Image (cartoon, rainbow, N blue to C red):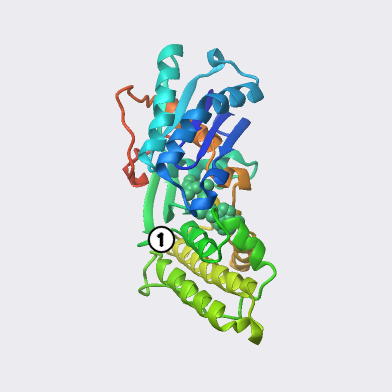
């Protein structure tokens, strides 16, 4: 089954062509980073307009790179939520048009299911059940994944997402949007144990996250640092970045390992934009190997928003015979636990 996947949930216009839910023939992403950079975050109105401009060339390029024609496709999968409504509408209506004109079945995909299944685009794949941490600009959640389509949420952020914290700290530092990669780069030059920023573990058994207190703490520290020049005492901006990053990484790893232990599984998956973070990967790999836990990550291009992961999710839904109606609408909020479990393929 050859599936075209389309994602326009936030600020990337993306399309990918995937065979059998695993083999990527193409994955094209048109980023809007330059457009939103001066504003320190995504401007929804601008994002929708940009998606309108980019959607046709992005889909065309994805098909060309995959060397497939519309008539070769067995299905079109499109993200219907969660995300920015104006952005989602562009992808959905474009996909509906293609589906109608070319008479190709359409699958309505939950963006978070796409992130969870993005790891199946790799050679090394986990086996069910496992615990997944999806950590991006819009989400930080833990799921017990029992099979395709079967996701039980174990925890989530009660305020900011981890990626959002990176983006906000980059804004405080005057480094623009998005912040993850720049903070990571800056942190490489810094000392992670120099400032003790708070770690919000919340209550003892909680698997929820909170990053807004950390962000405020970094903001106050940086303000003071700028005013009284703590750097005279040897603290550099890179030290603040490294100490901030360490706090996020500590909490993410602690909660992920706790969730794993609770469910008694030996495999964990980390996906979403923040899963690109090398400090997170190296610390987690070390902790996991000491506990005999296997960790699976998608490669960076499948961690950030992409069409291939949506095609992968679409494959399983269409294989099951789940076909979306042309009257369906987008959903700005769309818990992944609302999804119907899928029967494993023979
Ligand atoms: O998955 P994604 O592309 O979009 C959402 O669904 O939100 O994730 C984007 C987020 C941004 O907040 C970005 O700052 C963060 O992922 N990110 C990173 C890194 N690369 C991207 N955060 C930390 N370290 C990175 N290397
Ligand atoms: Zn995402």
Question: Can you give x and y, in whole percent of width and height, for residue 171 in the image?
Answer: 51, 61
Residue 271 seen anywhere in this rendered image of the structure: no
The residue identified by callout 1 is 160
The answer to whether residue 207 of the structure is visible from this angle is yes
Locate residue 289: give its quadrant.
Answer: bottom right
Relative to residue 162, is residue 213 depicted above or below? Answer: below
**Relative to 38, residue 289 above or below:** below
How far from the left and from the top, in percent, is residue 255? 46, 66
Specify whether tag 1 is near ligand 1 (CB below 8 Å). Answer: no
Task: Tell me where residue 128 appears, x and y as whole percent.
Answer: 49, 47
- Identify the residue at the far right of this view: 189
Measured as percent of width and height from the top left, residue 269 is found at: 53, 53
Residue at the front extreme of this rendering:
227
Residue sitting nearer the eye, 319 or 114: 114
Q: Residue at x 39, y 47 (%)?
A: 151
Q: Residue at x 53, y 75 (%)?
A: 222
In the current view of this chain or complex, which residue is farthest to the bottom?
A: 233
Labels in figure, total: 1
Q: Quadrant of residue 95?
A: top left
Which of 140/343 is in front?
A: 140
The residue tagged with tag 1: helix, strand or loop? loop
Question: To which quarter of the image does residue 209 belong?
Answer: bottom left
Local crowd size for mark 1, using a 10 Å CA cut-off: few (<14), some (14–19), many (≥20): many
Residue at horizontal 53 percent and vertical 58 percent from the top:
266
Specify the quadrant that holds the N terminus. top right
The vertical placement of 10 against 72, above or below, is below
Is residue 93 toward the left or the right of residue 312 in the image? left
Residue sitting nearer the eye, 270 or 174:
174
């Amino acid at each position: 089954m050859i599936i075209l996947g389309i994602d326009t949930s936030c600020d990337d216009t993306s399309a990918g062509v995937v065979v059998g839910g695993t083999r990527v023939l193409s994955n094209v992403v048109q980023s809007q980073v330059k457009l939103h950079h001066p504003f320190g975050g995504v401007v929804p109105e601008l994002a929708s307009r940009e998606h309108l401009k980019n959607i046709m060339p992005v889909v065309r390029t994805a098909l060309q790179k995959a060397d497939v024609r519309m008539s070769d496709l067995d299905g079109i999968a499109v993200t219907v939520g969660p995300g920015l409504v104006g952005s989602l509408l562009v992808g959905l209506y474009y996909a509906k048009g293609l589906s109608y004109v070319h008479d190709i079945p359409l699958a309505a995909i939950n963006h978070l299911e796409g992130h969870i299944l993005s790891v199946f685009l790799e050679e090394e794949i986990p086996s069910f059940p496992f615990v997944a941490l999806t950590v991006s600009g819009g989400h930080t959640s833990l799921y017990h994944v029992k099979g395709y389509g079967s996701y039980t949420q174990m925890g989530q952020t009660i305020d900011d997402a981890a990626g959002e914290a990176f983006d906000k700290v980059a804004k405080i530092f005057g480094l623009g949007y998005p912040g993850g990669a720049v903070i990571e780069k800056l942190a490489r030059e810094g000392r992670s144990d120099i400032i003790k920023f708070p770690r919000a573990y919340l209550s003892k058994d909680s698997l929820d996250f909170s990053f807004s207190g950390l962000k405020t703490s970094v903001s106050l520290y940086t303000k003071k640092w700028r005013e009284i020049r703590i750097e005279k005492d040897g603290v550099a901006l890179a030290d603040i970045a490294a100490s901030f990053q360490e706090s996020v990484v500590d909490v993410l790893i602690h909660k992920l390992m706790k969730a794993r232990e609770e469910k008694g599984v030996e495999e964990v998956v980390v996906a979403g934009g923040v899963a690109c973070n090398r400090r997170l990967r190296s610390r987690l790999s070390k902790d996991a190997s000491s506990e005999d836990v296997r960790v699976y990550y998608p490669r960076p291009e499948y961690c950030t928003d992409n069409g291939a992961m949506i095609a992968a999710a679409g494959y399983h839904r269409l294989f099951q015979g789940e076909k979306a109606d042309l009257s369906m609408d987008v959903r700005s909020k769309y818990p992944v636990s609302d999804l119907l479990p899928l029967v494993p393929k023979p």
